[in-house]
Amino acid sequence: MAIKYKHKCARCRKNYVVITYRTRYPLCYDCQKGEMVGEIKDPKMKKMFNIPEKFYRESTFLRSIKINYLRFGKLSERQIETFKKAVKTMKDEEKS
Ligand SMILES: [Zn+2]
């Protein structure tokens, strides 16, 4: 698992964002939520993105995948796989 640390949001410079070394431009939930709205027509994708809002709040990765999908209308197999895995991990963590 990648090391996580907190960094101030690159846009508002107010909220902290949990990031990994791979995050180049950390943005907080508040700054990104506007980009996360949009209609998802594909039922499979709709189901996949239908997760508790707080998961999006906690994860820059989940937010970026959703925004990517809304922007480009598609995702790679690998992105889908990683998204599902991340959601599962968060659900498991919640249970324990
Ligand atoms: Zn922000």
Image (cartoon, rainbow, N blue to C red):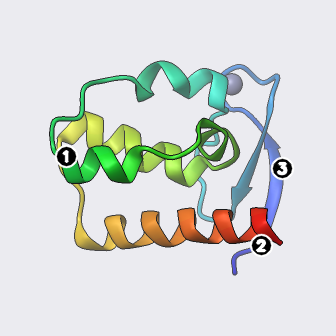
Secondary structure at numbered mark 3 = strand
CA gap between label 1 and label 3 equals 34 Å
The local crowd at label 1, few if under 14, some if 14 to 19, many if 20 or more residues have their Cα within 10 Å, is few
Residue at (29% x, 43% y) in the render? 46
CA gap between label 2 and label 1 equals 34 Å
| Front in this rendered view, residue 35 or 95 | 95
Secondary structure at numbered mark 1 = helix
Q: Position of residue 44 (x, y in %)?
A: 22, 54
Q: Amino acid at mark 2?
A: Ile
The residue labelled by disc 1 is 43
Q: Is residue 49 above or below residue 20?
A: above
Q: Is residue 9 above or below residue 69?
A: above
Secondary structure at numbered mark 2 = loop
Residue at (51% x, 43% y) in the render? 63
**Where, by quadrant of the figure, is residue 2 drawn?**
bottom right
Q: Is residue 77 above or below residue 18?
A: below
| Front in this rendered view, residue 22 or 86 | 86
Is 60 positioned to the left or the right of 16 in the image? left
The residue labelled by disc 3 is 6
The residue labelled by disc 2 is 3
